[in-house]
Amino acid sequence: MKSGADVLIVSTNRNDLPLPVMPYGACMVAEATEREGHHVRLLDLMFEKEPLRAVEKEMSATKPAVVGLSVRNIDNNDMQNPVFYPAELKSIMERIRMVSVAPVVLGGAAMSVMPEALLRFTGADYAVHGAGEVVFPKLVRSIIEGGAADDLPGVLRVDKYVIRKNECSSDGLTDCCRVPDFRRWINAGPYLSRLSSVPVQTKVGCHFQCVYCTYRRAEGGGYRLSSPESVVQAVSALSKAGFQDIEFVDNVFNSPYDHAAAICEGLAGMKGHARLQSLELNPFFIDDALLDSMEKAGFRGIGVTVESASDKVLNGLGKGFNSRHVQMASEVIARHRIPCMWIFMVGGPGETDETVRETLRFAENSICPGDVAFFNIGVRIYPGTALEARARQEGILSLSAEDMLKPVFYLSPGLDFRWMIEEVRRFMGVHMNVMNSDSLGLSFLPFIQRLACSVGVKAPLWRRTRTIRGMLRLLRL
Ligand code: B12
């Protein structure tokens, strides 16, 4: 029988805004590595007051043969108040190097966006692009047995200053919905007291071709669907384990439509409803039948990522739907009781002052006052996207792909930036159900979340935007 190695996985995400998200992938990777016979510990840095000291302490206690760093965010996607996370990651990396010679492997969502740049920036030994639960246990085995790891899909390594990358593959992924035993790996309490939901993924992949997005490149253009039965089982198991608020974290939940519909039907028949959410709905696939099933399944909040209500911008973003679909979705949503957050992104290709007005008119006339609208400003440019090519052509971008680790944003040359910022603020001043990225970055948001939880408010908290903003206005905050 093969002997196991001591492995430490560190979930490095410490960004707790707009709310702390449970380290879903890190827990899955830890569990899969343990199943392969290794001795695994997971250190979650989210609520650690002194993260470097916590890392050092855990390194001395575990003396791991391999360290995995789970890296979720590169930046906070906020053009006006950007935060760059790899700087903190680098100091974690340095602290590990100070106390250990164990090889360090980077993984996590950020690796599907800019793995090469992160590997160079941190000086780690390996990076894994993609499904860590399949590849990481094999990589650990290969490392402890002195292998070269050059046949493992999605693995990147530095070889004489050159980065070698193996092709990604979806082999090894099953059609079974994958949910770890969260309480085995993390202290869930502080997450729940901030009204965070438990993430569940019902599929991998994305077949849309939005010009700015990395999902398709990260997970492939085809879908790997979890069977609806296994999704229902996963939700039921979480619910029995005391997790009531569950969020589907697919890139797009309601595509393929039939898959989402079958999941909802299964959930509607489940004993003891969970409270469900998904912020990733595509308006093209919203109709009365689906929302009826979502209501029956127990959805307490949905988000529609429309980005714009102007055809010119929707076309420029490559969304694959038009303003008619956006309008139709608003009519369907108005006929149902599930609270909805409308997510917009202002400043994309083709945006002008007139298209901004068009979107604001839509928000004013077609979003129910009880629902919520969120406005993001600017579009983060990632290497390898069609938006990168366009930004270079338009002379907006001249940085090399490696230098794009520090956030760079696209803003349409046809837009008056100052006017747009003021216009969105003015709109927020009139409509208390509207948020922008300043709202997500409020320093006292954690306090509001804990307070809300302690008086029995249920997730998702954004449903209460109007009340919270009204109270903050009264308090002149
Ligand atoms: C759903 C989602 C959200 C939800 C989360 C809800 C919840 N309850 O969890 C919400 C809307 C709250 C959200 C918020 C944000 N998000 Co978000 N989100 C996603 C999304 C669509 C899915 C994430 C997910 O759970 N996937 C499923 C799990 C299983 O995958 P995973 O954790 O990545 O783990 C897998 C691999 O990464 C790997 N892995 C993980 N850890 C490790 C460790 C090792 C050692 C190894 C080898 C492998 C490995 O294996 C795992 C299993 O296959 C991703 C896009 C995507 N497809 O990744 C963006 C994404 C993660 N988000 C992103 C961003 C930027 C944000 C925000 C900063 C946005 C904002 N303006 O506020 C915030 C940050 C929140 C926070 N506190 O950190 C970026 C992060 C990268 C970047 N660009 O910086 C992504 C990748 C989208 C993108 N392309 O830009 N998000």
Image: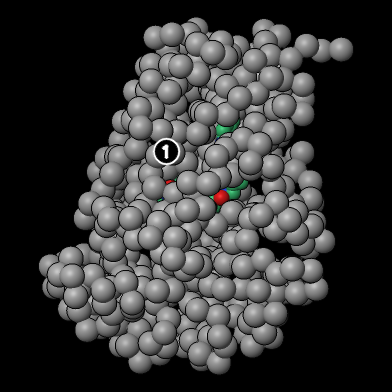
User: At which x and y percent is residue 196?
Assistant: 50, 55
Residue at x 29% of width, y 67% of height: 436
Number of dots carrying numbers: 1
Give, as a three-letter code, the residue at label 1.
Phe
Q: Is residue 16 above or below residue 126?
A: below
Asked where in the image residue 268 lies, by quadrant, the reply is bottom right
**In front: 301, or 190?**
190
Query: Which residue lies most toward the front here?
Result: 455
**In front: 37, or 419?**
37
User: At which x and y percent is residue 430?
Assistant: 22, 84
| Relative side of 290 to 455, left or right | right
Residue at x 71% of width, y 9% of height: 145
Residue at x 59% of width, y 61% of height: 245
In this rendering, does residue 127 appear at all? no
Residue at x 59% of width, y 53% of height: 199
Query: Which residue lies most toward the right here?
Result: 1
| Relative side of 238 to 441, left or right | right
| Relative side of 327 to 421, left or right | right
In this rendering, does residue 342 appear at all? yes
**Element assignment for label 1:** loop
Q: Is residue 11 above or below residue 338?
A: above
Quadrant where the N terminus is found in the figure: top right
Q: Which residue is mark 1?
A: 47
User: At which x and y percent is residue 105?
Assistant: 54, 23
| Relative side of 60 to 469, left or right | right
Other residues around mark 1 within 10 Å, as few (<14) / some (14–19) / many (≥20): some
